[in-house]
Image (cartoon, rainbow, N blue to C red):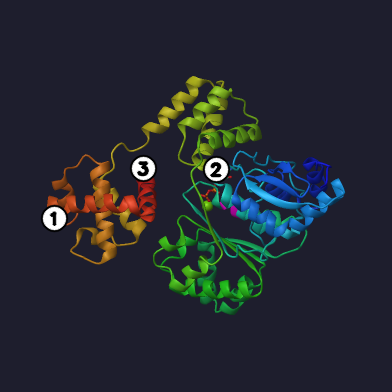
Amino acid sequence: MQSANVSWQECLSVLSERIQPQSFKTWLKPTQLISDDGNFLEIAVPNRFVANWLENNYTEQIVQAVREVCGAPRKLKYCVSPSTPRPVPVQPPPPVPMDNYSRTLLNRRYTFDNFVVGDSNQFAHAAAVAVADAPGRNKFNPLYLYGGVGLGKTHLVQAIGNAVAGNGAGLNILYVTSEKFTNDFIRAIAEQKTADFANYYRSVDLLLIDDIQFLTGKEATQVQFFHTFNSLQQTGGQIVMTSDRPPHEIHGLEERLLSRFQCGLVADIQPPDFEMRLAILNKRLSAEGLKVSPEIAAMIADGIRSNVRELEGFLIGLSACSSLTRQEITAELVTQLLEKRASKKPKEISLEEIQKTVSEYLRVSPESLKSKNKTLEVVTARQIAMYIAKHHTGHSLKKIGEFFGNRDHSTVIHAITKIAESLSIDGNLKHRLDEILKRLTA
Ligand code: ADP
Ligand code: MG
């Protein structure tokens, strides 16, 4: 048996010189040595994902570093321990030469370094770093990231692009929204340049395509996208997509596209919790050179819960208000602005808004909710609308029934019970309902 105990810190410092800084920070920095019995090293990692990633990608390098540091070999064993510290941002990456950017359409503001990682986005972040590490040469192709508005999807997808642009490999990167993809395609048709269009999109090594849900219903564009997709995958190109919902909830997308979306990795981003909002806020405050007390920062993080974009919007408003009126940022000023913001929100949701939002989200026509249409899609949408009306407006069952196509109150009760029952067993339904409510109350 070997007696020399391994200094994990020394191993890490050896590894930090051999592994890309961003990858080191994500995969190795948050590890700790638990035990060394001379045969096995037991290493604590924050989650299974990191364990698998280390096992599949870094075993050789770690074993080698351990051998160098303690002069004897060890085998590796990982143990998931959620309290293992998360990586903290290190120094910013080196600047990217300008010409790499000419075509990418990336915004340099969005980097991994200024992306705050917490429970709600840890998985998506880790997957994004993995893709940036080895675009096209990983199991996450395509990578599909989804989550509600303002939660950092665009930031993360562009951070992948910026990291790859900065790694010196000279890959061809392209960031587009699905709207731009559609418009480019339409223009190509008009100008009879569809072959150029196809070549252009198929020549990239890393295609980042944002807000894929807007391809819904655009059939010709979907066909183009499908071919682009296949061609990129055949040539080892990497695709990263974002959407406001999981693949199976994008109605009106071709089945074959949907199944392609799901053959890589699908990762979600949830709204940030209080600690994370506070961390994001503090980061922003210091970036803007704004000073507020910890109490005030906590008030803001507590007052704005919806998403990061709103949090940022509030800060901009706050800083503008304080500089215009030459007031210091005090608890009173913050309370005032928080109240002003709250009073702008509609107090009551109307039946018309429910009809509109439900039909938009579930992609049925608004009229169908009031019609005799009995297709499964419409019936489900109507039942969801009734359920929301019952729980989020003051209207009676009778009024709700009348509004949704002159139905009697027993139909409304049936709908509400049906949805309530399904909610307890159907996670997807719950997610859809949450999304609709988010939109209604946004
Ligand atoms: P989405 O595309 O999901 O709607 P964005 O990526 O546009 O959201 O994010 C909205 C704003 O919030 C951006 O300015 C982004 O930089 C910021 N943001 C979102 N999540 C984070 C995070 N985890 N850390 C730092 N900034 C964030
Ligand atoms: Mg976005």
Above or below: residue 198 compared with residue 264 = below
* Camera-side mark, 1 or 2: 2
Pinpoint residue 351: horizontal percent, then vertical percent: 24, 47
In this rendering, the answer to whether 129 lies above or below 314 is below
Q: Earlier in the sequence, mark 2 or mark 3?
A: 2
Q: Main secondary structure of the magenta part?
A: helix
> Mark 2 to mark 3: distance in Å?
24 Å
Tell whether 356 sits left or right of 128.
Answer: left
Q: Secondary structure at mark 3?
A: helix
Does the segment drawn in magenta span residue 156? yes
Q: What residue sits 44% from the left and 24% below the top? A: 336
The spot of residue 53 in percent (x, y) is 66, 55
Q: Quick check: is 266 in the magenta stretch? A: no
Residue 364 in sight from this viewpoint: yes
Q: Determine if residue 111 is in view.
A: no
Find residue 362 and name its label.
Answer: none
> Which amino acid type is shown beneath numbered disc 1?
Asn
Q: Give the residue pinned by disc 3.
A: 441
Left or right side of 318 for 22: right
Q: Quadrant of ligand 1?
A: top right
Residue under numbered circle 1: 406
Residue, disc 2: 119
Instruction: Specify start and end residues of the magenta stretch as a single range.
Output: 154-158
Residue type at the position of mark 3: Thr
Identify the residue at horizontal 47%, vertical 48% (top origin).
149
